[in-house]
Amino acid sequence: MKRLLAAALLFASTASAETVATGDMGVVIERATGSVLLVDQSDRAALARIEGFGDLSHASLVYSPDERFAYVFGRDGGLTKLDITTRQIVNRVMQSGNAIGGAISDDGKLVAVSNYEPGGVRVFDADTLEMVLDIPTGGKTIGLVDAPGRRFVFTVWDTGETWIADLTDAEPQITRIPDMGDRPYDALITANGRTYITGLFGEDGMTALDLWDENPEPIRVLPNYGRGQEEMPVYKMPHLEGWALTGSEFVLPAVGHHEVLWVDADTLEETARTKTHGQPVFAMARPDGRQVWVNFAHPLNDTIQVIDSVSKEIIHQFQPGPAVLHMEFTARGHEVWLSVRDAGKIMVYDTRTFEKLREIDAESPSGIFFTARAHRTGL
């Protein structure tokens, strides 16, 4: 009888508890106020503003595999763990003086942070935020991504080296790959975890690594393209994690040029160029790969162009407002959310009709991160 009563009480308690589903949620960085906005995709609405994240002037985040926790990386070196179901900060550590992003391991157990000051990468227990490993690199680290097999890959601006940290075993295995190029400034990894590509600020071209190779060697990509030989103003460096993969081709923003480049994903050779309105910052593919949405650096950052990935032609152009900083597609790509910083708005558009569906008030919004990222390598 006691067992039946206990079971009934448990059922009643469970039935009356509030159900919080995370798959429809997202977090928007409010860069000027050190706060984030929790949003709901289906309702196209803000749910809550959470404060106390420090300097978010250059911030990003990753999600735990269950989508419950967001790990926010602030410019001031703060690492903050946010529970999006309770809408509260559950832990925060100041792990460096100047940070530039982070990643979470494929098993969700480790969170790594890339640092400018004092440089290097620091790795933390995802549950407690206790530091478990400090990897000094002797320089500023950029392009930190997760790779399959509990590995982190990152590159050092000062030395032009890429490091692979394999944390599968108790004793970390560190591989250093030299000669990646002059002043690498950002990097990406493909969704299958095979190809790591870093952009170069100090010379033309980019450099790739085949991470499926037992001993990866630098592969030069587009050696005659870039900023190095022809000095030109660069108003904002492109974010390489905003590169798109559309079928068998990458489309990537050209550093300092008013165009995007199309590159064969297998041979890493250029296949085409599309002239654009300004210097691209993000060139992001709709999840089905059919469209690429592009935003631009100051002073032309009020404009969005949409490129058809088959014809490689611009099929739509519009001006959402001043300072369009970031774009994020819903998981299946039926909508795109834009942060329009200087208008203080998040704007939601239908990707088929290009109709504006909703505006959401936000304080100087920048990065938009939906929880679907929890299940994608490199994001």
Image: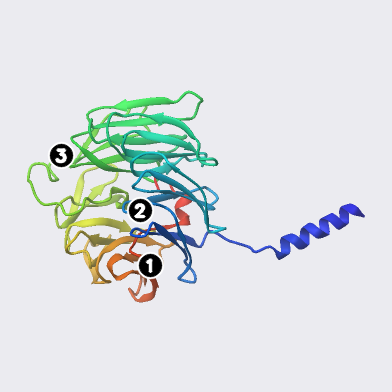
State the residue in front, 210 or 318.
318
Name the spot of residue 230 as percent of width and height, x first: 7, 45
Horizontal side of 253 relative to 188 (left or right) equals left
- Location of mark 2 (residue): 56
Corner quadrant of residue 364: bottom left
**Amino acid type, mark 3:** Gly
State the residue in front, 144 or 308.
144
Name the spot of residue 14 as percent of width and height, x first: 72, 60
Residue at image point 44% right, 55% down: 52
Name the spot of residue 311 as percent of width and height, x first: 23, 62
- Location of mark 1 (residue): 362
- Location of mark 3 (residue): 202
Residue at image point 31% right, 50% down: 248
> How many C-alpha atoms fall within 10 Å of the one at disc 2: few (<14), some, or many (≥20)?
many
Horizontal side of 157 relative to 345 (left or right) equals left
Disc 1 vs disc 2: Cβ atoms closer than 8 Å? no
**Amino acid type, mark 2:** Leu
Q: Residue furthest right?
A: 1
**Amino acid type, mark 1:** Ala
Residue at image point 35% right, 70% down: 345
N-terminal of the two: label 1 or label 3?
3
Vertical position of residue 236 compared to residue 93: above or below = below
